[in-house]
Image (cartoon, rainbow, N blue to C red):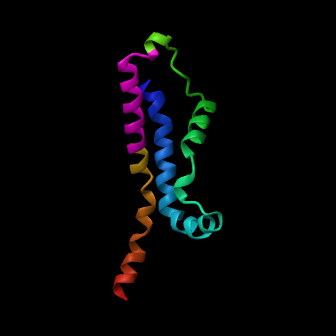
Amino acid sequence: VFFHNALPFVGFGFLDNAIMIAAGTQIELSIGVVLGISTMAGNLAGYVEALASRLGLSIPDLTPKQADMWQTRLSAHLGKAIGVTIGCILGMFPLLFFGEEEEKLEEK
């Protein structure tokens, strides 16, 4: 249950952070202004979960009683929280490429 919930959220956190860091401002200024929406309006998690399912991430075979147990709910929530945290940390890789631009601006 933990891994079933964590893996899609690693992907979500990674994509969300990487896209928002790399292109968030440009998306906001171009598409966001035209459509009147924010970059936060998208639902990337649903697409990542569907992709994980297609790639073979199987749903745990639980009885209704097992699915309703507090331990199962805790495992699911912890999996999502830890997964998105790991994904967001991994998704910060575009920041590695911004160091040179900031140094050039400081020199000016």
- 19 on left or right of 78: right
Quarter of the rendering occupied by the C terminus: bottom left
Taking 75 as reference, is 10 left or right?
right
Q: Residue furthest front?
A: 36
Question: Where's residue 12, x and y in %?
Answer: 50, 44
For the point 54% across and 64% down, which residue is it? 23
Determine whether 23 is above or below 69 in the image: below
Q: In the rendered image, which quarter contains the N terminus? A: top left
Is residue 64 shown above or below 43?
above
Q: Nearer the viewer, residue 36 or 2?
A: 36
Residue 57 in magenta? no
Q: Nearer the viewer, residue 36 or 7?
A: 36
Q: Which stretch did the figure color magenta?
A: 67-85
Residue 67: x percent and y percent? 46, 17
Relative height, residue 55 to residue 38 (above, below): above
Q: Is residue 94 left or right of residue 37?
A: left
* Image position of 86 with respect to 4: above or below: below
| 37, 26: nearer the viewer | 37
